[in-house]
Amino acid sequence: MAASLAHIIHRLTTDAQFHARFQASPVETVGSCGLVLSHQEMKVLVEMLDLVSHVDSRSSDDNTTDSTSGWIGGASFTHSALTRPA
Amino acid sequence: MNPQYHHPADDLAHARGDPGTHDLLSDVYALLTELCASAETDEAYRMALQTVLDAAYTSDLGGLRLTMLPLLICQASNGVADKVVPIAAAWRALHIAAKLLDDVQDGDVVRMSSSSLDLGRVINLSTGFITMANLAIVRAEPAVCPMLQVMFSRTILQMAGGQYRELQLNASASLDQYFQIIAAKSGSFFALAAWSGACGAGAEPDQIALYERFGYNLGMLIQIMDDLEGFRCSVGQGDLAQGHLTLPFIYALEVASTPERARLEQLLHSAVVDVEAEVQLRHLLTVLGAEAYLLAEMAVYRAQALAVLDALHSNGSATKLLEEWFVTLQLWMKQH
């Protein structure tokens, strides 16, 4: 489903209205494009939505220090399995 | 490397009661050095192989220590890690050979033409490391040796096939085609590391299959990270400046409009000789969402790898050190 994820990210990045619709109801918005994402892909997209904000809506200093907007060090890169007690 | 840096893989040495911190890793390189030293071959060739080995060891110590993967997986499968040192050595030798050939394919060797390593010598050294991998496998436990030989050979063919297809990539390539290539080149290679570590530990077939899946997802994650690094390089240094068709560009071809596609192809062609074209190309790829896409794919493969670790933990595997190693890998990704 690499192509589906690619097309959704492209729309999120380049189409502010699509981004807003996705933010409100991700599953329905993806379905309306006739595309299918896996559960994991959908989860990741929702988590990293700020990163794929429409270019025009980003603040000017969004990418000054971390081009991932902190995402790679944020919630996506922590996991209960990795903090499990010994 | 930070002198305070502590790598989870070091705990494997402690866990088996040894005071040394890098024992198992040095055991792997000691075996490769022994194989190199005992080979009946030209002395200059032997020295050239050893020079590459020394560089690989230094790189391992300061980097991700991917060589530890079969050992960590053996330990997680409740096996004795020392027993899979020959397997880790075979995998690392194959890794070095693949890296050398990759440099030839990417043209990196030609660009280094002022060095003593020309194209022919690199191919020659690569052949030596593939042979050393075969010799290392023979040192594995007799019960698993034939299976390992078959799996290593199959994987080498898969990787070579992926590399062959990569050479034929052009601007009409699809994302699916690209993912098939990196699955053959990187997914299968890391799946082999995980499979062989679990196999060497005498794990049950269902557990071996889970580790293999973990390795596959890890390999895909590392390959995409590599493409991201190649995209983020300074002007004149990265994949765009060398005209390489990697994931950011293939993504853009998939989603771009017809005029944008024409512009992308034109810029990639020019970026090899024109810094301004490279800057424009990087900007266009970013605007199209290429970087976000790569990060999303990395997150997907990471999540899949973690799901496998969860399943293994539930099945009673001692995955703590492997999980910590995986965390270290992610920290490394964040820092680079």
Image (tube, coloured by chain):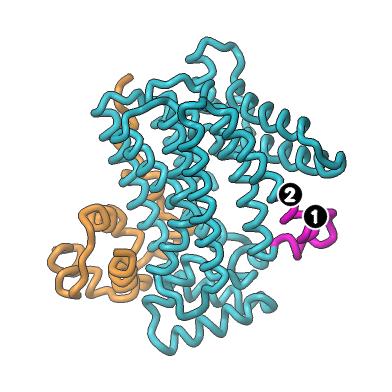
Chain colours: A orange, B cyan
Taking depth in this image into account, of B143 and B115 the one nearest to the observer is B143
The magenta region covers B108-126
Residue A1 in the magenta stretch? The answer is no
Q: Position of residue B31 (x, y in %)?
A: 66, 28
**Chain of residue at mark 1:** B
Q: CA distance from mark 1 to mark 2?
A: 10 Å
Left or right for B204, reference B162: left
Taking depth in this image into account, of B178 and B235 the one nearest to the observer is B178
Q: Which residue is mark 1?
A: B117
Mark 2 falls on what kind of element? Answer: helix
Amino acid type, callout 1: Leu
Can residue A53 be seen in this snapshot?
no
Q: Position of residue B23 (x, y in %)?
A: 61, 21
Left or right for B323, reference B69: left
Residue B117 in the magenta stretch? The answer is yes
Q: Is residue A83 above or below residue B223?
A: above
Q: Which residue is mark 2?
A: B125
Q: Position of residue B257 (x, y in %)?
A: 38, 85
Disc 1 crowd rating (10 Å Cα; few below 14, some 14-19, many 20+) is some
Mark 1 falls on what kind of element? Answer: loop
Q: Position of residue A11 (x, y in %)?
A: 29, 73
The N terminus of chain B - image quarter: top right
Q: Residue furthest bottom?
A: B259
The quarter holding residue B115 reads bottom right
**Chain of residue at mark 2:** B
Disc 2 crowd rating (10 Å Cα; few below 14, some 14-19, many 20+) is many
Label 1 with label 2: CB-CB less than 8 Å: yes
Disc tally is: 2
